[in-house]
Image (cartoon, rainbow, N blue to C red):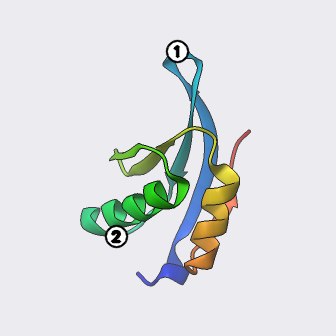
């Protein structure tokens, strides 16, 4: 799908140990394309992260930064949850 077809949800979550992660869900496409997007987001946010179970996880609360970056790339990105 083209970037404008991606309807992504971005939310902040707390995981074990009280740590925060930013979760991006709703990506449709190949695993390689998802990994490439995750890499760009990790570099832009200067943080660690991973791709698992069809979602991208970034360390820390990066919600506003991620939404801005995704929209700049032409994706539809919306805040979800808390």
Q: Residue furthest right?
A: 82
Quadrant showing the N terminus: bottom left
Badge 2 crowding class, 10 Å Cα cut-off, few under 14, some 14 to 19, many 20 or more, is few
Q: Residue furthest top?
A: 17
Depth-wise, is mark 2 or mark 1 nearer the camera?
1
Pointers 2 and 1 in contact (CB under 8 A)? no
Q: Is residue 28 left or right of residue 26?
A: left
Quadrant showing the C terminus: top right
| Residue position for label 1 | 17
Q: Quadrant of residue 45?
A: bottom right
In what element is the residue under mark 1?
helix
Distance between the alpha carbons at the discs numbered 2 and 1: 32 Å
Q: Is residue 53 left or right of residue 57?
A: left
Query: What's the residue at 40%, 58% (across, down)?
Result: 38
Q: Is residue 34 above or below residue 25?
A: below
Query: What's the residue at 65%, 50% (across, down)?
Result: 63
Query: What's the residue at 58%, 81% (across, down)?
Result: 74
Q: How many marks?
A: 2
Badge 1 crowding class, 10 Å Cα cut-off, few under 14, some 14 to 19, many 20 or more, is few
**Residue 46 in the image, given as x and y percentages of width and height:** 50, 51
**Residue 53 in the image, given as x and y percentages of width and height:** 34, 45
Query: What's the residue at 51%, 61% (across, down)?
Result: 44
Looking at the image, tell me whether mark 2 or mark 1 is earlier in sequence order: 1
Q: Is residue 7 above or below residue 1?
A: above
| Residue position for label 2 | 29
**Residue 16 in the image, given as x and y percentages of width and height:** 50, 18
């Amino acid at each position: 799908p083209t970037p404008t077809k991606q309807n992504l949800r971005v939310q902040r979550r707390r995981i074990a140990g009280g740590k925060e992660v930013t979760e991006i869900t709703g990506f449709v496409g190949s695993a390689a394309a998802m990994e490439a997007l995750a890499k760009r987001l990790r570099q832009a946010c200067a943080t660690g992260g991973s791709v698992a179970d069809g979602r991208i996880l970034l360390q820390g609360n990066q919600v506003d930064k991620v939404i801005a970056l995704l929209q700049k790339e032409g994706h539809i990105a919306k805040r979800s949850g808390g």
